[in-house]
Structures are given as structure tokens and as C-alpha cells.
Image (cartoon, rainbow, N blue to C red):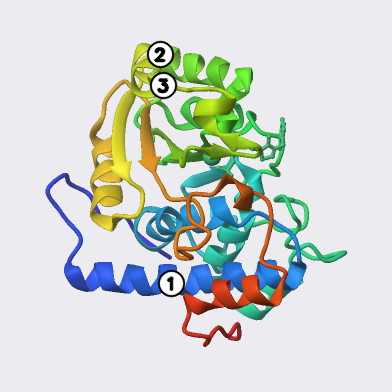
Amino acid sequence: MTFLPCYNLFMSLTSEKVSQLEEKASQIRKSVVEMLIEAKSGHLAGSLGMTDILTYLYFVALKHDPKNPGWPYRDRLVLSNGHICPVLYATLAEAGYFPKKELLTLRKFGSKFQGHPHREYLPALEISSGPLGCGLSQTIGMALADRMDNGKSSNRRFYCLMSDGELDEGNSWEAIMLAGKEKIQNLTAIVDRNNIQISGLTDEVMPLNPLVDKWKSFGWQVEEIDGHSFHDIDRAVCQARTVIEKPTVIIAYTIPAKGIPEFERKYEWHGKVPTSPEEIEIARKMSNDKIQISN
Ligand SMILES: Cc1ncc(C[n+]2csc(CCOP(=O)(O)OP(=O)(O)O)c2C)c(N)n1
Ligand SMILES: [Mg+2]
């Protein structure tokens, strides 16, 4: 069982803790790469870009219990951008929810690890996801239900991970408006601001700026972070816990395909995987050719 380690604004991560998180994130990236190579399909860029944030959430921030995924007092994490589920699966495995070797069944018939998260197959998930633009509404529904049960002082937190391309979905903005109106202070949305989507740069497909002003105008507290800095992530997640009468959005600037310099920042890696021997060699280089998935 993991308990909240950052209960005040002034507590920062020790350098030892940061090193541990970096090591975890590195293991998780290796798992993601191996899963995708084995599956021969899937989403690489967003998965590697969001690895540090998921690592922080599961190894520092969330109240959760890998031995009891349905623990009623757990915090809730919704992966609205469901296509980056390889990193969620790899993080859950790293945290002890299931053996890491099972990850290699990604996208296989009957596997727990479907190409988009399927809650019926994997109860550690809060929702099934894949159709973009739905997760924030679902998270708000959970938070409002929790408010009915426990009142406004509930100390359960709700996290919704979203992508920047997903903000092209109108339903996202209905949800953003509702959370502002309801002043859901125990809600944190985290936007993967990686500037790419399926067919190009977000600036070319559908510009989102001024993104900070837009969220603020809907009644949200906005934090901007380097999504690869554990100190930044920690500061923003802890700060969100202190905000009263407002939901918080963390706009996380991330590098798509982070960890494989040759693939970084290229939208073409949104939804493809290394397949040629040359690409596989490049992808495995980040691990010094020592990738192993076993428990
Ligand atoms: C409702 C809906 N429309 C279209 C898609 C197909 N789709 C999957 S990912 C994606 C691009 C979204 O951009 P983003 O999530 O920012 O991509 P990433 O940064 O993860 O590469 C699209 C259009 C979808 N999953 N759901
Ligand atoms: Mg994106």
C-alpha cells in the first residue's frame, strides 16, 4: 500500500528518490519498447513521453495497492488518451500489479493488455478508453459521485491524463467547463503537451494556444511543467493538493518518443513501432542492448 508522501508544499524529492525514479522510468521505457517490438504495432511516442509522469504518479503520488487494485480508498487515475496504454501497463507491472513477462502479450488475442485499455480484462484500470475526449467527463462523474458519498472534504484525488490532440474533441471542453463550475478541487488533469498528434504537429492540425488562458478562463488552476523533471512534476502535483474551490490542470511539456533521440519529436512515431532491424537496433540502444523482461 502506498501512502501520500507529499503532504505539504515545501517538501521536495531527495536526490536519492529522484535517482530511484529515474531508474524506474528507465525500466518502464525498456518494457514499453520490448512490448511494442513484440506486438509489431502500438503507440510509441506518447508512451515514452509520458513515462516520467506515470512513474511519479505510481511511485510517489497515488494512494493505491497493487495487491488489492479495488481498494476502496485508492485515488483514481483515468487514462483518457488510451492509446498510450503500453506505458500504463508497464508502470503497473513495475509497481507489482502483475509479472512483467506478461507484458509481452500486448495486443495478442485474449490478452489482458489490449491495444486500448479494456477494464473487463484488466480490473486495475478505472475505465476502458481509446475514443478520445471521454475521460475527463468520466473522471468528473467519479469525483461528483465521491462528493455525494463523502462531501467536499473527501481526501480522495482524481487524476485524468489527457493528450493535446485530444483537446480537439469538443466533449473535452464541456467537461472542462463543468469541472470549473462544480469547483472540483480534488481533481487534477494532466495534459501531455507534446505538440504532436496522429497526422502532424498540433499547430498545423488544430492550434491550441493560448492553452493556459483557455483553461484559466474555464475556472481552473493551471500549472506548467517540464514533464521530464521529477522536481517539476512533484511541485505541481503537490501544489494541486493545496488549491481550494478549483480543479487543477498540469500542462506537461513532454518530448514525444523521449529516450530514443533518433525518434524524438517526430509525429510519425505517434502510432508506429520499430519494425526493421535498423529501427529495432536504434530503439534498443537506449538500454545498452540489455533489455530483459522477466520477474
Ligand atoms: C474520438 C476519436 N477520434 C479519433 C481517434 C483516433 N486517434 C487516435 S490517437 C489520435 C491523435 C491524438 O493526438 P495525441 O493524443 O496528442 O497523440 P500523441 O501525442 O499521443 O501522439 C487520434 C486522432 C480516437 N482514438 N478517438
Ligand atoms: Mg499529442
Identify the secondary structure beneath mark 2: loop
The reply to whether the C-beta atoms of the residues labelled 1 and 2 are less than 8 Å apart is no
Query: Of tags 1 and 3, which is closer to the observer?
Result: 3
Q: Dot 3, how many residues are within 10 Å of its Cα: few (below 14), some (14-19), or many (20+)?
A: few
Give whichever of 27, 45 is nearer the camera: 45
Q: Which quadrant of the picture is home to ligand 2? A: top right
Q: Is residue 6 visible?
A: yes
Q: CA distance from mark 1 to mark 3?
A: 32 Å
How far from the left and from the top, in percent, is residue 218? 40, 13
Q: Give amino acid for label 3.
A: Asn
The reply to whether the C-beta atoms of the residues labelled 1 and 3 are less than 8 Å apart is no
Image-based side of 180 in relation to 285, left or right: left
Q: Is residue 139 visible?
A: no
How far from the left and from the top, in percent, is residue 156? 41, 41
Identify the secondary structure beneath mark 1: helix
Q: Give amino acid for label 2.
A: Phe
The residue that appears at 38% across and 31% down in the rendered structure is: 249
Q: Which residue is mark 2?
A: 218
Q: Which residue is mark 3?
A: 209
Query: Of tags 1 and 2, which is closer to the observer?
Result: 1
How far from the left and from the top, in percent, is residue 35? 67, 70
Give whichever of 157, 80 is nearer the camera: 80
